[in-house]
Image (cartoon, grey):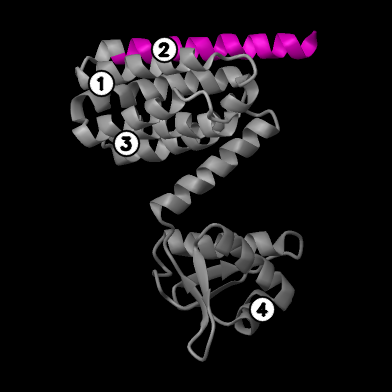
Amino acid sequence: MTVQRKTTGLEFDDVVTTSAAKQIAESVRGAILEGRLKVDERLPSEDELAVRFKVSRPTIREALKRLAAQHLIRSRRGPAGGNFVTAPTAVDAAFSLANMTTLMVAVGHISLDDMATARLELESVCCRLACQQRTQADLDAMNVEIGLQKKSALTDEEFCAADVRFHRALVNAGGNAVMKFLMHSVVEALQPISNMVIYRVRERQAIVSYHKRILAAVEERDEEAAVKALADLVAYTQDSYRESFARRTA
């Protein structure tokens, strides 16, 4: 029989010793997401949690580490210190998403073709939004990165960074917070991985030419031209994937 206990804002069931830290972290996380634990509310002490969950203090510490890694709690030292509920910022959430996406690519759960397809579909929406919402500052930001990409003295790492910033500026020009969040994993995670795969076979000037086409279309508010330029860029990237893998195989 499951015995349910309750403390302020937090309900939990007795847990088994296997993966106890994970179960405790999920229980606290659920209480936060459901609003039973409020932002800035102080959690019970480690000793109190250990007694209530019937586990050791090291198990509680592991659970708290899991919650901190998810940006759901923060620690504060001093007489009024302890562990407090916090709310992850959009930046924190996007960063976590990008890290998880990178890991999924690394272990083979996301293929390069999946990357290209997702990028085309999502960024096409961003192109259309950018054509509608862009400001002169957005155009200037993209133009600055194109100017940098033209410099032959740029290292591969610097060129890749300018590439990422160009697409970040394109997404930002759309002015849609949800798309910015979703595209973070594409721009900040998949884009660098893509560059890492193809940098030996791509032509920098080809990338620059596609970026110039995208910028010109956004400036003219021509949605179809912007999407077409992006599609050509993604197709070029996919061809570069194939050439890169063919060279490795040879």
Q: How far across and down, in percent of the image, does residue 193 sit? A: 60, 29
Query: What residue is drawn where x is 62% and y is 80%?
Result: 46
Residue under label 1, please give it: 218
Query: Is 96 colored magenta in this rendering?
Result: no
Of labels 1 and 2, earlier in sequence is 1
**Between marks 4 and 1 in the image, the one whose residue lies nearer the viewer:** 1
Tell me the tag on residue 50: 4
* Segment colored magenta: 226-250
Amino acid type shown at disc 2: Ala
Residue under label 2, please give it: 231
Residue under label 3, please give it: 172
How far apart in space, not on screen, are marks 2 and 4 (Cα)?
55 Å
* Residue furthest right in the image: 250
Of labels 2 and 4, earlier in sequence is 4
What secondary structure is marked by label 2?
helix
Of labels 3 and 4, earlier in sequence is 4
Of labels 4 and 1, earlier in sequence is 4
What secondary structure is marked by label 1?
helix
Of labels 3 and 1, earlier in sequence is 3
